[in-house]
Image (tube, rainbow, N blue to C red):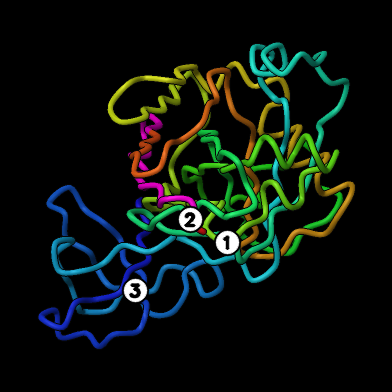
């Protein structure tokens, strides 16, 4: 089931507030009552075509985005780093979230900004100390993320909060796929149409059950929290005006453009 968060266009006759809907294979949305993460799937009688809406980030975390670093061996190698013994986690603010089609803003203090295509987990309920055998109990679904990073600020600061925390530095979308099961699906990142990253999610060092277990051993997760699972090798800069698209088999494609560097 594909859960879309959207704003209707005026012609749709559904008002202008963000809504949720279930997308079918005819690009029609069955409008839902309320937020399905908090209230469950409650259909209304209303439908709208995908062409009549603006698709938003599928979740707007009220709490946090947790990210896992260096979770593909080839990416750890390109960063001149050893494979970690346990997950390396950090936080991105919820204000960094952007939606499909939104512009990634290149901040003035960053010399360059990189793409990092990732599989993202959306949490369904309050949870703490979840054993890996029960990881699926706390997952609402999966989406796609771009963990945008200023590599020069990351190096300068010696930590990642500023380099990865700017507004618009966490595009998510285009929707949540509730029936996705991470196996051998491929993540493909294209910059202006050229393939830059291409690797199956099965190459994750720490798989989703281990990630859930580890993160919840550290902190309580809340409904709508998002976990980014790590990026494959092939990261690189996004020039001003470029377009980056991240595709994961079984979910879809997240596309964003990059602004000129803010002066």
Q: Is residue 257 magenta?
A: yes
**Count the marks: how many?**
3
Q: Nearer the viewer, mark 1 or mark 3?
A: 1
Q: CA distance from mark 2 to mark 3?
A: 32 Å
The residue labelled by disc 1 is 167
Q: Earlier in the sequence, mark 2 or mark 1?
A: 2
Q: CA distance from mark 1 to mark 3?
A: 28 Å
Does 138 sit left or right of 1 as displayed?
Answer: right
Residue shown at 51% from the left, 31% from the top: 237
Q: Nearer the viewer, mark 2 or mark 3?
A: 2
Q: Residues within 10 Å of mark 3 (few under 14, many from 20)?
A: many
Q: Position of residue 141 (x, y in %)?
A: 51, 49
Q: Earlier in the sequence, mark 2 or mark 3?
A: 3
Residue shown at 35% from the left, 47% from the top: 257
Q: Position of residue 24 (x, y in %)?
A: 21, 53
Q: Position of residue 7 (x, y in %)?
A: 30, 74
Give the camera-side residue of 261 and 45.
261
Give the camera-side residue of 226 and 113.
113
Q: With respect to residue 74, does 122 lie above or below?
A: below
Residue shown at 30% from the left, 31% from the top: 192
Q: CA distance from mark 2 to mark 1?
A: 7 Å
Residue shown at 35% from the left, 39% from the top: 242
Instruction: Check residue 139 in the rendering and tell me which mark sits there, or answer none.
Output: none
Q: Earlier in the sequence, mark 1 or mark 3?
A: 3
Does 262 sit left or right of 68 as displayed?
Answer: left
Instruction: Check residue 105 in the rendering and tell me which mark sits there, or answer none.
Output: 2
The residue labelled by disc 3 is 32
Q: Residues within 10 Å of mark 1 (few under 14, many from 20)?
A: some
Q: Magenta part of the protein: which range? A: 247-262
């Amino acid at each position: 089931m594909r859960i879309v968060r959207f704003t209707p266009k005026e012609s749709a006759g559904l008002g202008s507030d963000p809504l949720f809907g279930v997308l079918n294979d005819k690009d029609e949305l069955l409008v839902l009552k309320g937020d399905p993460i908090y209230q469950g799937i409650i259909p209304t009688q209303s439908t709208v075509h995908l062409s009549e809406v603006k698709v938003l980030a599928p979740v707007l975390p009220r709490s946090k985005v947790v990210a896992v670093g260096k979770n593909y061996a080839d990416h750890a190698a390109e960063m001149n780093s050893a494979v970690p013994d346990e997950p390396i986690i950090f936080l991105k603010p919820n204000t960094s979230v952007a939606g499909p089609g939104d512009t990634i803003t290149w901040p003035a203090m960053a010399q360059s900004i990189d793409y990092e295509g990732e599989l993202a987990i959306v949490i369904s309920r309050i949870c703490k100390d979840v054993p890996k055998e029960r990881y699926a109990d706390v997952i609402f679904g999966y989406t796609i993320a771009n963990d945008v990073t200023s590599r020069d600020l990351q190096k300068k600061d010696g930590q990642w909060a500023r380099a990865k925390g700017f507004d618009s530095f966490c595009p998510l979308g285009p929707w949540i796929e509730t029936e996705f099961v991470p196996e051998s699906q491929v993540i493909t990142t294209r910059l202006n149409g050229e393939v830059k990253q291409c690797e199956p999610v099965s190459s994750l060092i720490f798989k989703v059950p281990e990630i859930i277990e580890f993160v919840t051993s550290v902190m309580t997760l809340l409904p709508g929290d998002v976990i980014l699972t790590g990026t494959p090798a092939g990261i690189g800069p996004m020039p001003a005006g470029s377009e980056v698209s991240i595709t994961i088999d079984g979910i879809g494609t997240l596309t964003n453009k990059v602004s000129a560097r803010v002066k």
